[in-house]
Each structure stands twice: as structure tokens, then as C-alpha cells.
Image (cartoon, rainbow, N blue to C red):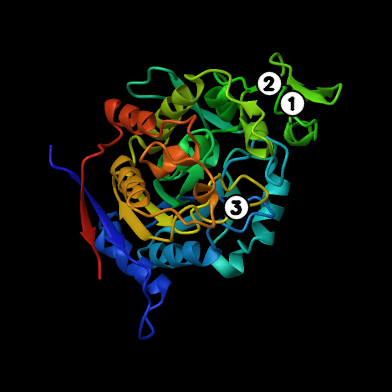
Amino acid sequence: MKPSDVYFINLRCENGDSRLDKLERLVKKAGISTIDFKGKFVAIKLHFGEPGNLAFLRPNYAATIVKLIQELGGKPFLTDCNTLYVGGRKNALDHLDSAYKNGYMPYATGCQIIIADGLKGTDEVLVPVRNGEYVKEAKIGRALMDSDILISLSHFKGHEGTGFGGALKNIGMGGGSRAGKMEQHSDGKPQVDRDLCIGCGNCVRICAHDAPKVTHKKAWINHDACVGCGRCIGVCPTDAVQPGDGSSNDKLNCKISEYAQAVCDGRPNFHINVVIDISPNCDCHSENDVSIVPDIGMFASFDPVALDRACVDAVNDQTPLPSGKLGEVACTHGDNLMNNHPQTNWKIGLEHAEKIGLGQQAYTLITVR
């Protein structure tokens, strides 16, 4: 099989050539204009950023894609689904408030926002997963499935559960309703290393399900209440909260690939990854650490698997920034993403996505000037 084409453009901007100009040039070269947008509803799936986090993509990127789709005759809207955890995006009203605070207002982006799974995260469609091994019917936000065309616009970064967050994470986990997110996370039940725990209560405050408890100045997790979302892992300042078993993150990666398959199947889809502000953790955090490697550029493809693989390779080709997390930890893997979160194996998700027919990891990188 011929490798998938992945298009890349760097971030150098000289002689009045802006980064947004380069984004438009990139997606045109990658073939976005070959999609028939006329009169079609177009979901632009992205992450609006948890309030307090500053690594999320600025709305200017979305506005550039919105304008181009409108010029091609489409009816675009920005969308995401509600979250499992306590924060600024757990219901549609809070989610919209958070989006507006982060600059995603219609007058700035040129289109409306629709929270895909409704007010309480329960408005979902059961979508069969072609070749699904872990999920037979994915629970996808209804507005996302009602659209005629899918465009993913993703901020590429590290992730504590999957190794990295790119197109597959944005579409798969991000496209799931609250119940869908619960299904994807359900195999992982974190444990607390009591020797490392300082009893700060961060895990208690972040949990939407009242699973972590602190007794005698040490945390523990009620697995009957825990849904395995992993937020407690991300907020623990001493790494006392750890994945329960070595297979849980692997299963999470596989389920994300199967959810992404459900979202993409049967309609035109196109994918953009912006590889800047490469924070060690997801944009779901209410803060962000400094980048683990330097900014790289923007990538686009019709194949989300090849796209994510190209971005992984680009990140792993970089020398870690000494001021970031990788400048402080033992880098034993020869792999920046695995050194960032050694308990994860990012390869699993891409291998499974390829296995079920979502795309392929083989790619030809085409540089756009």
C-alpha cells in the first residue's frame, strides 16, 4: 500500500507571511479543497482549553479554518463533548463559558459553538465500530454525528494516559459523550503509593465521582466509585497516584482508536495537528507546564493515523528542553514521549488504529513552503 501523504509547514514567518497564512497554505496543499463542502454541515472538532491552561490552541487557528470552509460553501461549527471530571467543561453551560473565556466567541472565530453531547453530556448516538475489539457501539456526541463532514484541529502534546494527545485523542476521547468517556477509561483503576502520598487532597478535589479519600493523612481510592479517568494521576504532586496495572493504558489507547474509527467512518474527514507549546500533559489540566521540546510546526493529512505518527516522530527527533520536565527526569527510553510518561506506550494506539483500518502509520512527509 502506498504510504499516506502528510503535509508539513514550519513556523518561520518572514516578510509579512503570518502563521495563519501558512496554516491556510498548508491545508490547501494537503487537499482540503477537494472535499465537497457546498451546503454541508462541518464539525470542527477541537479542545477549547480548560480555564487556567494556556497551552491550548488560540481561536485564531480555528478562525482561519472556518473562513476557508465558508469560502468553499460549507456551514462550519466548532464542537467538543463534555468532560467526566470536575472542571470548567463538565456541562454545556460551563463548557461554553470556558470557551468564551478562552476567546472562542463567534465574532472571533466566525461561527457558532455546539457542545456535541448536550447540556449534561447525555445526548449521544450509538455508532457501530467497524472491526471493534473492545467497543462494539461507541457513544458519540449527537451533534458530531449529525454533521456531514469532520475536521479535526488538534494541539499535539504529551498525555499522562496515552503518551501523547493528537488527532486520535481529539476525535476518539473528545468525541465520546460522558458515558463514552467512561467506557474508554473503565479498565484503568489507579492505586495510591502511600509511601509517596502527602495527603494534600488534590485527588479528592479533582474527582467528579467522590472516589479518592484521605484518611490519617494518606489518600486511597474507592474502586467501586472510580471510573478510571486518570485525572487524579495528573494532579498528584508526588506521583503517588499511579495506574493500577500495566495494561490499562494500553486498553485506553485501543478504545480511543476504536472511538475515532466510529467518528470518522462513512464521511469525509480531514485532520490538522499544530505542534507547538508541547506540554507534558493534556489541555484538560487547569494549568500547563513548559514545553518538553521546542515548537515544531503544523501538519495536515486525510489520514489521522499517519498524521499522529509523523508528529510523534517529529517530537522524538527533537532535543529536550532543559527547562522542561525532560530536563529533570531520567531519559532512559530514547523516546521523548515515553520518557515524559514512562507508564504509557504510545505505539499501542497507532498499531491498533492501523489494525482496524482507520489509517496507516507509513507516511510520506511533504514540506510546504
Does residue 164 appear in the picture of this structure?
Answer: yes
The one of 327 and 214 positioned closer to us in this rendering: 327
Q: Position of residue 171 (x, y in %)?
A: 45, 40
Instruction: Please name the residue that numbered disc 3 is placed on.
Output: 289
Which residue is at a point 64% across and 54% down the rendered structure image?
A: 53
Q: Is 222 above or below relative to 255?
A: above
Is mark 2 in CB contact (under 8 Å) with mark 1?
yes
Neighbor class of circle 2 (other Cα within 10 Å; few <14, some 14-19, many 20+) is many
Determine whether, in the image, residue 227 is placed left or right of residue 282: right
Instruction: Please name the residue that numbered disc 1 is placed on.
Output: 209
Q: Work out which quarter of the rendered image holds the C terminus and state it.
A: bottom left
Q: Position of residue 268 (x, y in %)?
A: 32, 45
Instruction: Please name the residue that numbered disc 2 is placed on.
Output: 226
Depth-wise, is mark 3 or mark 2 nearer the camera? 3
Tag 2: amino acid:
Cys
Label whose residue precedes the other's in the sequence (2 or 1): 1
Q: Which quarter of the figure has residue 256?
A: top left
The one of 212 and 184 positioned closer to us in this rendering: 212
